[in-house]
Image: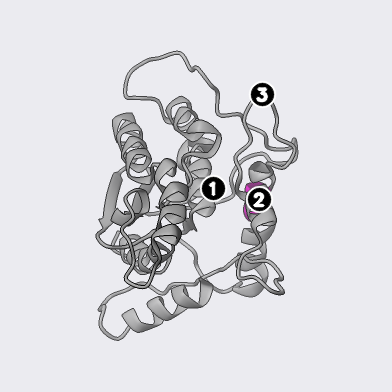
Amino acid sequence: MGTTAHEAVHRRQPLSFGQPDTIVVSIGYPLTNNIYDFVYRFQDYSPPIPTPRIPEAHGDEFLEFIDTSLRPWIRGSVFPNVDFTRDALYGHSFGGLFALYALTIDGGRMFDTYVSASPAVEWRNGTILEMLKDSLGNGTSSIPTVAARDTRSSNWAGCTAVNETYSDPALLITYGSLEQFPVKRRRETQEQFLVRKEYFGPLKMTDYVHEVFDVVSASGKLRDVTLKEYPGQDHSGVAGTSIMDGIEYFVDW
């Protein structure tokens, strides 16, 4: 995905006049026989919840690593002469869930822009929806029902990001029309189609992303919230398309 993002940025430059210089930082894992390491993805991208604590959920630790280790290293050691003014966080599927979790920390000020592609909102029966409500509010005074737990270590005093252009973040949410409502492929057997349909249908991608959009929009805490559907695309197809759109969304501000 990192190479896809780099290619998208590179190809925009000759035709997008005035596009700011952009650096792509991709975080991955050492792999052998699979493009994804589902164990690490689940552990690193799962948001912690107040009770019960899920032993494998280390989303808070991963976010702290990005903020206190990776970002200072990128800015101070890799590109010490670059003046960083804005940054964005992109994630797909469980990564999209992680992007929404990051939005709940410090009022969403950790990043300037969040791109959540086909987020796994169904995780823990949609708990991220309550975390968003409790962190961002709903535009009115209310009592939280499930607190978005601040699980940062005592050494993490606050996010180190400096987004100088805007004080309020922006959020792009994307999804494919065929995720919740798949159709049979031409070379797919009926049995294969039913297996795929029974897996993806109950994840309720369309329903959940609309709920996320409604919750975040109602908070009034973001400068922009955009929900974009990709007609004819399934879960895997959204990953590549949303990277290109996410870059467009980010640099357009």
Instruction: Give the residue type that dot 3 points to.
Output: Thr
| Res 183 → quadrant | bottom left
In this rendering, would 11 be left or right of 145? Answer: left
Mark drawn on residue 51: 3
Q: Which residue is mark 1?
A: 98
Q: Residue at x 73, y 37 (%)?
A: 153
Residue at 64% across / 25% down in the picture? 50
Tell whether position 64 is magenta.
yes
Looking at the magenta stretch, what is its main secondary structure?
helix
Q: Which residue is at the front of the view, 48 or 190?
A: 190
The residue segment tinted magenta is 62-67
Q: Quick one: label 1, few (<14), some, or many (20+) residues within 10 Å?
A: many
Which sits in the foreground, 82 or 3?
A: 3
Give the residue displayed 61% in from the left and 40% down from the top.
158
Could you tell me if residue 97 is visible in this image? yes
- Image quadrant for the C terminus? bottom left
Q: Choose the circle earlier in sequence order: 2 or 1.
A: 2
- Mark 3 and mark 2 in contact? Answer it, CB < 8 Å: no
Which amino acid is tagged 1?
Answer: Phe
Quarter of the figure with residue 250: bottom left
Q: Are marks 1 and 3 in contact (CB under 8 Å)?
A: no
For residue 45, side relative to residue 93 (left or right)? right
Mark 1 → mark 3, Cα distance in angstroms? 18 Å
Q: Secondary structure at mark 1?
A: helix
